[in-house]
Image (cartoon, rainbow, N blue to C red):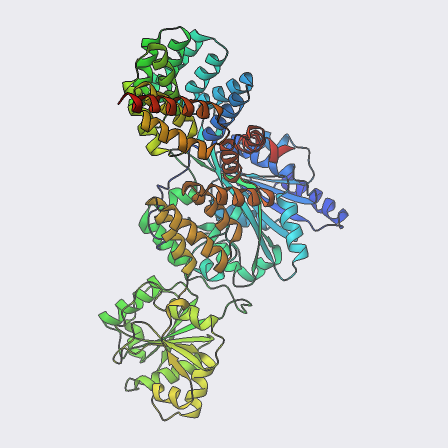
Amino acid sequence: MPDNPRTSKKYNKARKHSQVYFRAKKSKPVVTVLISTYNRPRYFAEALESIVRQDYRNLQIIAANDGGEDVINIVNSYDDPRLLFINRKENRGLPYTLNEALAQAQGKYICYLGDDDLFYPNHVSTLVNALENQTDYQVAYSDLYKVYCKVCPDGSRKALSKVVEISRDFDRFFMLYYNHVLHVSLMHRRDLLEKTGLYNEKVNVLIDWDMTRRLVFFSDFYHVPKITGEFYQPAGKCDRISILGRKNEREYAKNILRIRTTRPPKPWTKIKDMSIFFITEKINKQAGATLGSIWQRTFYPYEVYLPLSAENFEKLDTEMPNIIPVPVNPSSSKDQRIDAALTQCKGEYITIVPSGYPMREFWVEDSLHALINSSVHNEGFELEDSTDKLWSVLLKKEDLLYARRSFPNLPVRESLKAAGITIRRIEPEEIPFQFDQLLEKAKEAEKNGNWSRAVEMFAYMEKHHQNELWMKSLAAKASYMAGAHTRAFNLSQELNRQRPTVDTLLLEAKIKRSQKDFDSAIILLEKAEQILEGNQLLWT
Amino acid sequence: MDIKQNNVEEQHDSTQHYEVLQELGDCYTSIGNYSQAQRYYEKAAVLSPDEAGPYVGLGVVALQQNLLDDAEIAFRVACRLNKNCAKAYSGFAMIAQQRADYKQAFEMYLKSLELDTDNLVAILGLFQASCQMGSFAKVIYYLEMYLNMHPGDTSVMFPLAALYMKDGQLEESKNILLNLLVLDENHKDAANLLEEVEHSLVQTKQII
């Protein structure tokens, strides 16, 4: 029978040791670095080494073997009081292992490393500095190289390319929809976990997004556009959870739904809740289908309020979470049902949607994005597919309350009008994810060889949608391909002064070479080569 | 935009490291540091064993050091990896030229240009080999084609003007030389040739 890792003598001794160590070090905040490993001893050794050699020394390092191949010799090769080892014999999965490690965490801040990824020596110090200086933020993240590599027969990895694929400024709305922050690049305050809760052990893919999504309820994320580490993507077969987990589409979709419907305990400091009033007289096939679509297609945090008679709740047979029954008289009118839900609802935003309303992706988020960003008072939005028969509206709770209190005898629509609440439809420029749509179009232009168009689009996005470095890098490459070498040169030179990457170094070097300035080209190329070989940034 | 898409087969840039090594090899070759150039080409060959590029580079390095047998082996490997490797055929041509086998050089340059009409080394090589052999017809065709793609390339304008003159196409030669001198007014060879062409034109007119 395997030892209980939490009661073994060795474990307790190590824990006591580290507690004494951390009491002694008070000058700089302690950072706990968690690394879980499963059957990748070779890469784990490199990953662990990259933690131990951080230039920020005040660390608590918790390494956990999730029941995989023995790595005790690797851990024992470090006589480092900062290192705590959880050596579990059974495989329980990443969320369980992270929770187990978090139970021992003592740092003010937490960060994570995958067992096949690497931190550069400045990773922890970069993020600690960001969080200590930006006190409004409790979460920070940096950029990472995605290393596309080939695995040699001896298991060593040879980099084929190192690319900063994403360098996106924090976008809360997007984070609710999907993840744009790599977990390895993330650092957060430990006390945030008291609000978010621990890792969800029922989630088996997108484990990181499940946590980062919950973090956005409580903090903005500070983006440090420095490259502070690497994550690996081997050519051919890949054993990353994020890749393997997507292969089972049904299971993947189930995980997404689970994550999207997770609501951390209130109060939420950064997100306003949305209450959906689902208006139907009875639960029938159509109502069931509309409810199911709400579940499938809503990514903004919500609860569905169901103002129905008691016998209808008995008919309600769904696994759908976040449903709040609101008992009403069977003969209640539509307006009475809305009023009943209004007395109970806790959301700051309210959507009224009837059974049979056609649900499409972003059915409510398009208008919600406009409402969140609207500076106009007393304004709500009629949803895009709303008709007189299937009238559907999104507005602030305070506005609906005001209208109903002021004009209780009028129908809801009339009462809003009477109360001076303007209900309008969104304008095209108000829809969310415009940056992503533009990016998609620019990439398509690149694919079709329309490089000049792509350059224009990247320049526009840089001006209007933040993400300066990212857009400049894309514009530099596209300019080169479009034959606009002067522009490509200026952009890549500017980027290389600010934050050189292999791509921008290579680009500037190519242009220098075409100008027959071989010495300058060589300097740039050798810098790129050092990054690709991992010589320069990692251990010097 | 749908995150539920089963998007596991992402496109990856797998050539970046190879490209850096090749560029390094080429730059070191350009400044005459052949040992460094060789080092980087060899690294590129290990990283991307199916690419012909590093062997072309190694061949050029050997050629520059007059190691003709080594160069030939390298170009052969390049051809084996990519039977349409225009640069390797240019390499064979240069070796033949060094060995004073102008016929072979001419054929190899032609082969190279059939595969890549945009190959300046082959065009200029073909010009040289033609001069050595005294046969110009095919060269004019390739130089014209190249110049259509790269208008204003003075390195091709001059040989083409010279060939036009040898071929008796004096007006064509004069036009190209005038254009060349607009682009590079200090091109002494062009100025001298223009003088010669204008003289021939006057003589021709007098005969008529």
Comparing A465 with A424, the one in front is A465
Residue A273 picture location, percent across and down: 47, 71
Residue B149 picture location, percent across and down: 34, 33
Quadrant in which residue A77 is drawn: top right
Q: Residue at x 49, y 14 (%)?
A: B64
Q: Which residue is drawn at 42% across and 65% down?
A: A300
Q: Which residue is drawn at 36% across and 13% down?
A: B131
Comparing B43 with A295, the one in front is B43
Q: Using the rendered image of the protein, determine whether residue B100 is visible from the camera's viewpoint.
A: yes
Q: Using the rendered image of the protein, determine whether residue B16 is visible from the camera's viewpoint.
A: no
Comparing A422 with A473, the one in front is A473
Q: In this view, does A280 lie above or below A212?
A: below
Comparing A537 with A125, the one in front is A537
Q: In this view, does B48 lie to the left or right of A356?
A: right
Quadrant in which residue A436 is drawn: bottom left
Residue A23 picture location, percent across and down: 75, 49
Residue A234 picture location, percent across and down: 43, 34
Tell me the quarter of the image containing the C terminus of chain B.
top left
